[in-house]
Amino acid sequence: MKEDEFEGISIKRETRVVSPKEQKKDSCEQQERNTVRPDCFADYPGQPQAKDNLMVYVKAAQKRNQVLDHILLHGPPGLGKTTLANIVAKEMKTPFYNTSGPSIDRPGDLAGILAGVEKFSILFIDEIHRLSIQVEEVLYSAMEDFSIDLIVGQGPTARSVSMPVAPFTLIGATTRMSSLSRPLQSRFGIQERLQYYSSESLALILQRTAHILGIKILPESAEILARRSRGTPRIANRLLRRVWDFSIALEARVIDSKVIQYALERLNIDAYGLDYLDKKILSVIGLQYKGGPVGIETIAVTLGEERATIEEVYEPYLVHSGLINRGPRGRSLTDKGRKVLEHP
Ligand code: ADP
């Protein structure tokens, strides 16, 4: 950590967790497209609404030569929130500072981060719902007035001093919008919810990843894999890597449907793309609790899993796929969920 001085207060400047990634390349078109994580809008399939809106806001901010408004991205994990934030920074040609809610313990940590942020740069805070209330309060004035109030001294001599912050854009990401405090949520001028991807978009993502990694996969195999990826690029890319491993073990020249079927069986992923825990959740509701409704806490305890994991990672997809319903008295199986359970 480096120490900076402001009005006699030493501020620890974080250099480890938060470090700007240099945005040296000039424009999206001129970049070499060789990283699995896309770094321009053109290489980011899916999320048409969020993407198109962000493109407009970025262009407008550039035209006005003004700082881009603060952005909140929400939705289940692995849908591309971090990737989009990074793309916004690249398109704005500004530095990207990356940190997360749990790693900002105290207001002083945030002050240290903000002291190092440059004009117009992007500060990305992942899991922003996990910021403490004390840190949130410092963030409010930073977001609104580009200044923060710090308390100097103790007891009767304590006084509040205002420290200026360079105009910056905060991009917050959360998987739990409901856990975000109202005052914080209302300070984001731009709010976009990311949706599960269509199989078509995921197939494009898979083909791009395969191309970058030098994996030979038939288009129809990419489509099968896309349909088994729970609408999530992170899962699609992970499955592709595992299927690649199996193709090497099988000495297959190319990933065809035979390799895919074999690998998916070995990975215990069924025709609906459901994995072991998805199926356990369906069976707890369907068999142990006779179709529900059953509370999320009970499901979590029965499975020996964290409630947050079930709520943030598993449940949204099961609801999205129409397999379970979320009601005031708990979760229950739908007719489709019952069919999936009875005919796996
Ligand atoms: P989140 O922040 O929402 O958890 P990430 O941005 O970390 O998700 O994305 C997870 C992975 O999926 C990344 O490795 C990224 O390469 C890939 N990914 C996400 N969205 C896309 C997209 N639209 N196109 C291509 N790859 C994507």
Image (cartoon, rainbow, N blue to C red):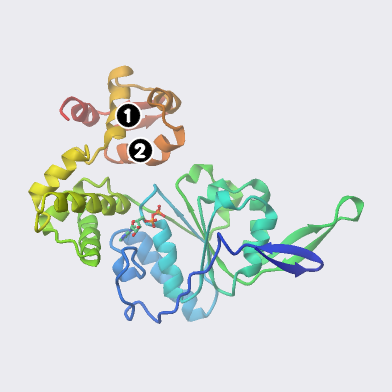
Q: How many marks?
A: 2
Say left or right for 133 vs 294: right
Residue bearing mark 1: 281
Query: Can the viewer see residue 140 in this picture?
Result: no
Which part of the image, by quadrant, shows the C terminus?
top left
- Please tell me in which quadrant of the rendered image residue 213 appears: bottom left
Question: Foreground: 177 or 219?
Answer: 219
- Please tell me in which quadrant of the rendered image residue 306 appears: top left
Question: Foreground: 238 or 287?
Answer: 238
Residue bearing mark 2: 314
Look at the picture and state if 98 lies above or below 311. below
Q: Horizontal and vertical percent for residue 94?
A: 50, 74
Mark 1 surroundings: few (<14), some (14-19) or many (≥20) residues within 10 A: many
Q: Are marks 1 and 2 in contact (CB under 8 Å)?
A: yes
The image quadrant where one finds ligand 1 is bottom left
Amino acid type at image mark 1: Ile
Asked if the beta carbon under badge 2 is closer than 8 A to the nearest atom of ligand 1, the reply is no
The residue at 14%/58% (across/down) is 217
Which part of the image, by quadrant, shows the N terminus?
bottom right
Mark 2 surroundings: few (<14), some (14-19) or many (≥20) residues within 10 A: some
Amino acid type at image mark 2: Tyr
Question: Foreground: 292 or 233?
Answer: 233
Q: Horizontal and vertical percent for residue 44?
A: 31, 64
The residue at 74%/60% (across/down) is 149
Q: Dot 1: what SS?
A: helix
Q: Horizontal and vertical percent for residue 268?
A: 21, 37
Question: Foreground: 3 or 164?
Answer: 3
